[in-house]
Image (spheres, helix red, strand yellow):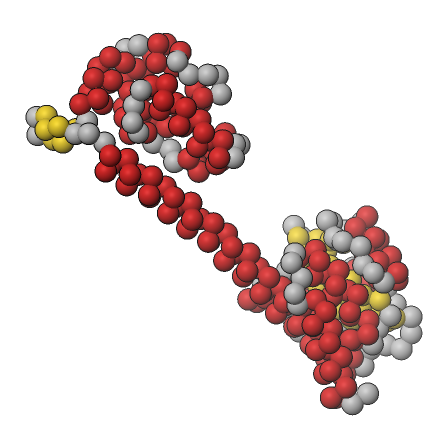
Amino acid sequence: MSTAAQSAQLLAAYAAFRTARSVEDLFAAAAEAAPAATGFDRAIIAAVRDGHLTAAGSRPIGHGPSDELRRRLMADPVRLRPGTEEAEHTRLVRRPRAAGRVPGAAEALGLGAHALAVVAPRSKALALVVVDRARRPPSAADLERVDAFAGLVAIALGHLLLRRQVADLAQEVRQFAGTAQALAAEVRDAPAAIVGEGLVDPRLIAGADAGRGDAADVYGRLSEKERPVARLVAAGRSNREIAAALTLSPETVKSHVASILRKLGVPGRVEAATLLLRAER
């Protein structure tokens, strides 16, 4: 096959998996495309996780022989033992030496004439492309094609992980903006008076004095679900931190905080925190 034809096959394979929406979908689509793109009989994209090659959590592959390989690896992950071919690949050794090689994935998975190539976006080994066929050991040209294919998988995986990071960052920015707007509105709308040397809310002083030393009364106004939220509000935790600490959704925490403010008769969480802390003294 000409170099141009091989390049066309690789690009066609890349087009088949580059738009995957999840890592599982990407690995399954890449495994389906790999045999035609690399000239082998079956293929799997094995994740590198916790010192093992694994197919845990993988999606079925729409290519029978390849899916058989996936199921075998899913049932029995391969430990990355020092000196094995696969362990050397994950160390980003381009061509591990075969002489004296420790038995590993080839024996565990029953591979024939095979080739491995690392998927390493940003130079971090996250997976291995594993391909094999019944006979005809891979030539240098075959190995180059498998390496090129793994490089395309790495590009697609890198883009997918970047899109996920951007989405997570956008969500954090939206949450921060919402919190900032709420705090700004709270400061803007709170009535204040000059007392002593500072600017304070007279309702805060009245509420704090009324609640001092009366924790049972203050917390008694709250439901059982609201009390742990109130204690974290008193500790100065944000809604997001409270949600993580109590394993609640941000929306649930927001609802509890609003109810706490209403039941305590205070305009904001700063006043609520002060009232709760005074009550505990």
What residue is shown at x 60% (from left), y 61% (from top)? 160
Q: x and y percent of residue 82 in the render? A: 69, 59
Task: Write down the quadrant of residue 269 in the picture.
Answer: top left
Residue in front for this viewpoint, 213 or 191? 191
**Would residue 85 be seen by someone viewing this image from the given angle?**
no
Residue 245: image x %, image y %?
48, 32
Left or right: 45 in relation to 195: right
Q: Is residue 131 left or right of residue 15?
A: right
Residue 120 drawn at (x, y percent): 62, 66
- Quarter-wise, where is residue 68 in the image? bottom right
Residue 274 versus residue 47 in the image, above or below: above
Q: Residue at x 91, y 74 (%)?
A: 135
Number of dots carrying numbers: 0
Whether residue 72 sits left or right of residue 214 in the image: it is: right
Q: Please state which of residues 84 and 134 is positioned toward the viewer in this rendering.
A: 134
Q: Is residue 243 left or right of residue 269?
A: right
In the rendered view, would you say 69 is above or below 93?
A: above
Residue lying at 54% horizontally and 61% vertically, measured from the top left? 162
Q: Is residue 33 visible?
A: yes
